[in-house]
């Protein structure tokens, strides 16, 4: 953005706490800015905020997941639905780890991933079972009790998936119980997920190049604000990368 003489300010929220995003939006209503790049995890709050930006004549770009009914300048990110399909293709009887959000049942991105996941299983005539485990972000003892009971009642479970970036929680349990018979697929190359993949506990991580999403989002805003040049397409899907123990060392997620 330097070449356009535009400064970028970052505002953060807790992706597992709906109230923190609501508080952030309230703060942004008092801020002066010319454009916004918005992570759309909480779509039900992003949509009315986007309408406010429309009324103020402020352009905005979405990352993470798309909301087609809004008037975004562009979207940069993976097809969350297709990312769910990819997870399903990698996995038999499956445990789905749902991380309990504070004040919300989950993110827009996770819901879309799960829709893709279920769609693929239906299409392929999946005859196994999905077992849901409601896990807590910072309560290892509680999670251990829930998962111990689940695996005791359903010994045929051979696959596991989480649709957000916390597969390290399930991975930690599998490692502690020395369960090498369960294939675990998760999303996002955060440090703890990467460590579990490198250790062979996680079978595969599905990555979405978040740095590239942010970079391209800011550049699209700059080009519009300075040159009035629109992106060639509104929806710009990023590659869906499948990372394994053998190739994660070569994956440079910060390369734009």
Image (cartoon, rainbow, N blue to C red):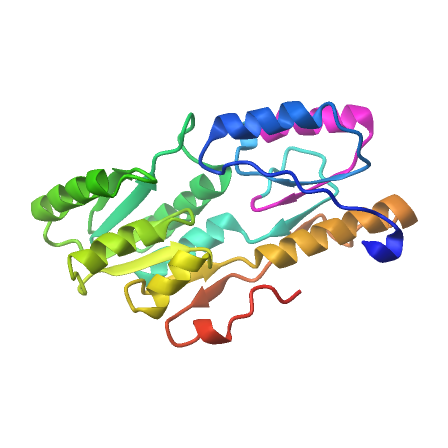
Residue 113 placed where, x, y %? 44, 47
* 157, 151: nearer the viewer: 151
Quadrant of residue 142 within the rendered picture:
top left
Question: Which residue appears farthest toward the right when viewing the image?
Answer: 227
Quadrant that contains the N terminus: bottom right
Point out residue 203 in the picture as x, y percentages from the top left corner. 32, 65
For residue 71, what is the image quadrant? top right
The structure residue drawn at horizontal position 42% and vertical position 35%, both measured from the top left corner, is 106
Residue 37 versus residue 185 in the image, above or below: above
The magenta region covers 45-65
Q: Residue 29 lies in magenta, yes or no?
A: no
Name the image quarter holding residue 138. top left
Total tally of numbered discs in the picture: 0
Query: Residue 97 at what x, y percent from top left?
Result: 30, 45
Q: Could you tell whether 134 is left or right of 34 in the image?
A: left
Q: Is residue 73 above or below residue 3?
A: above
């Amino acid at each position: 953005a330097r070449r356009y003489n535009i400064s970028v300010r970052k505002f953060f929220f807790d992706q597992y706490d709906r109230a923190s995003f609501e508080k952030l939006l309230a703060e942004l209503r008092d801020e002066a800015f010319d454009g916004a790049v918005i992570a759309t995890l909480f779509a039900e709050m992003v949509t009315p905020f986007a309408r406010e930006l429309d009324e103020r004549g402020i352009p905005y770009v979405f990352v993470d997941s798309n909301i087609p009914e809004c008037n975004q300048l562009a979207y940069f990110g993976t097809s969350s639905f297709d990312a769910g399909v990819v997870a399903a293709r990698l996995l038999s009887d499956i445990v789905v780890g749902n991380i309990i959000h504070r004040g919300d049942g989950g993110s827009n991105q996770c819901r879309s991933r799960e829709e893709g996941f279920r769609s693929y299983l239906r299409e392929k005539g999946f005859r196994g079972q999905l077992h849901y485990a409601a896990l807590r972000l910072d309560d290892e003892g509680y999670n251990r009790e829930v998962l111990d009971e689940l695996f005791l009642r359903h010994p045929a479970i051979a696959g596991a998936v989480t649709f957000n970036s916390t597969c390290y929680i399930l991975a930690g349990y599998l490692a502690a119980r020395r369960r090498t018979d369960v294939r675990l697929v998760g999303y996002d190359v955060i440090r703890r997920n990467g460590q579990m993949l490198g250790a062979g506990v996680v079978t595969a991580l599905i990555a979405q190049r978040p740095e590239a999403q942010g970079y391209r989002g800011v550049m699209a805003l700059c080009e519009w604000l300075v040159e009035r040049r629109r992106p060639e397409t509104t929806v710009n899907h990023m590659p869906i990368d499948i990372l394994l123990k053998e190739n994660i060392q070569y994956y440079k997620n910060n390369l734009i």
